[in-house]
Amino acid sequence: MLRCPTCGRHYPSDVKYCPEDQAALQADSTVPGEVMHDPLIGQTLDGKYKIVARLGIGGMGTVYRARHLLIDRPVAVKVLNQRLVDDEASRVRFQREAKAAGRLQHLNAVAVTDFGRSSGGHVYIVMELLEGRTLREILAKEAPLETARAVSIMLQVSAAVAAAHEAGVIHRDLKPANIFVTQSADAPSVVKVLDFGIAKLAAETLDEDEPKTLTQIGAMIGTPRYMSPEQCNGEELTPAADVYSLGVILYEMLSGMVPFSGSTPLAIAIKHASEFPRPPREIVASIPEELENVVLHALEKKPEDRPRNAAEFRNDLLELTERLGLEHHGRLSSPDIAALRGAGVESPSGRLVVDLSKLREGRVLSSAGNNEITLVNSPAVPPPPEKPPTPNTITRMEIVAERNNTTRVLLGVAVIVIILLLASIAYFAMHQRDVTTQPALNANVTPSVVPTPTPSPSPSPSPSASVKPKASPSPEKKKGNSFVDKVKRILKKPF
């Protein structure tokens, strides 16, 4: 086993250089009981920061856990490697790290609170102390990550890098070891981007002249597995170089491996410049095809073929995430002043009174927040269901409706009964009138008399004589028993 003298990691004997910091690997010490002692542990820098323990070693400095003695608060202190103190270029680059990080006021960027040089010659910066794990440690145990988790981490990382690009800062060394995922029992995980130590400030943002010897033509500064082709070739960098590194990191989170690897930094650099990456869906088939397209777009060889900066990359990723319905924590929790003014009113004294419920509704219906975008060509979303009335209103409406229905039913039945009764009375009255009138008409007609037949010469006379017509029975006999009379009697005396 070989050991990296810079970061302390162990690698197989066939690996010559540390993949993280490109330091030449060395064999472990064979002297039993030999322990490397850090002379800074226990010392106090500038009478304020007492070094407690070493947290990690990077390419330019060592990070320690320390305590701010004046306010009794734990902090992180990054000290420039002692072997680089006499190097003016490294010292200026380290000072640039403090300036670059100090300019970034973002939730996903580590906060820098102080910078100085101790009486003992140690150059240091003071940062917030983070509790959690680096993305490198997470990937070593859990890769490949679930799609929604990988996208959520990348949304936060790209938000911090987008803020750096807006401030004129190019990170140039984005890698999982510089991405920290905080862990807290009472708050969701927050991703922090570390180490802007080799960032290149845009020329117009520099407060002082930059020594031209800091970035020599053909010099490679960064980690080869995550470097863009133009960075491997030592060309002038743009924010698109960081976009390439973000694409490599997202590729590794989704597939569990980097797109290019090799035994030496030069071999890796050549692959970045000349070979095309293997589609991640060939490694993990569950990766959405649209997400694969976003990753491969960020890994284009030419800078002009990629998103121009981290903000464009993040916008594409966020739009896809919303379209796929992936759960994420990419939205920032702090609303901007425009959102606050839209959800509030200004009092006569000049104070802004914000309606929190209106603010929440506005943030749900709109993506126009800090570092957010408005979705374009998103699929049609069905309108939300109408807001039901309050329980009291529902109960009151139900009771009233029930009473009205009962009254209407009773009234309807009574009307129908009355109509039927009247119709029956009218029908039987007309029928009775017809029965009563018909015999009277027949009585007024003179009955025809059958003539007496002429007696035949038959010896016996005809016994028949003239027949008298039978009178029809008088209707008066049934006058008292008719149906109409009965109904009249009932109506006169119903009880």
Image (cartoon, rainbow, N blue to C red):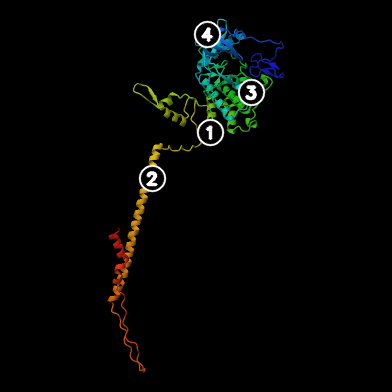
> Which of the 4 image quadrants contains residue 93?
top right
In percent of width and height, residue 465 lies at 32, 87
State if disc 2 and disc 4 touch (CB < 8 Å). Answer: no
Determine crowd level at label 2: few under 14, some 14-19, many 20+ residues with C-alpha closer than 10 A.
few
Residue 447 in percent (x, y) is at: 30, 80
Mark 1, secondary structure of its residue: helix
Under tag 3, what secondary structure? Answer: helix
The image position of residue 118, as x and y in percent, is 55, 6
- Real-space Cα separation, disc 4 to disc 2, in angstroms: 78 Å
Of mark 4 and mark 2, the one earlier in the sequence is 4
Residue type at mark 1 is: Arg
Residue 173 relative to residue 17: left or right: left
Q: Which residue is mark 4?
A: 48
Disc sitting over residue 323 in the figure: 1
Q: Give the amino acid type for the residue marked by disc 4 in the picture.
A: Lys
Which of marks 2 and 3 precedes in the sequence?
Answer: 3
Task: Describe residue 486's horizontal placement relative to residue 258 as left or right.
Answer: left
The numbered mark at residue 140 is 3
Mark 3–mark 1 Cα distance, whole angstroms, equals 30 Å
Which image quarter holds the N terminus? top right
**Mark 1 or 2, closer to the camera:** 2
Which of the marked residues, 1 or 2, is nearer the chain's N terminus? 1
Residue drawn at 42 percent across, 38 percent down = 388
Q: Residue at x 66, y 13 (%)?
A: 5
Q: CA distance from mark 1 to mark 4?
A: 51 Å
Which circle, 3 or 2, is nearer the viewer? 2
SS for dot 4:
loop
Which residue has dot 2 on it?
402
Percent x, y of residue 474: 29, 74
Q: Is residue 217 above or below residue 402?
A: above
Q: Earlier in the sequence, mark 3 or mark 4?
A: 4
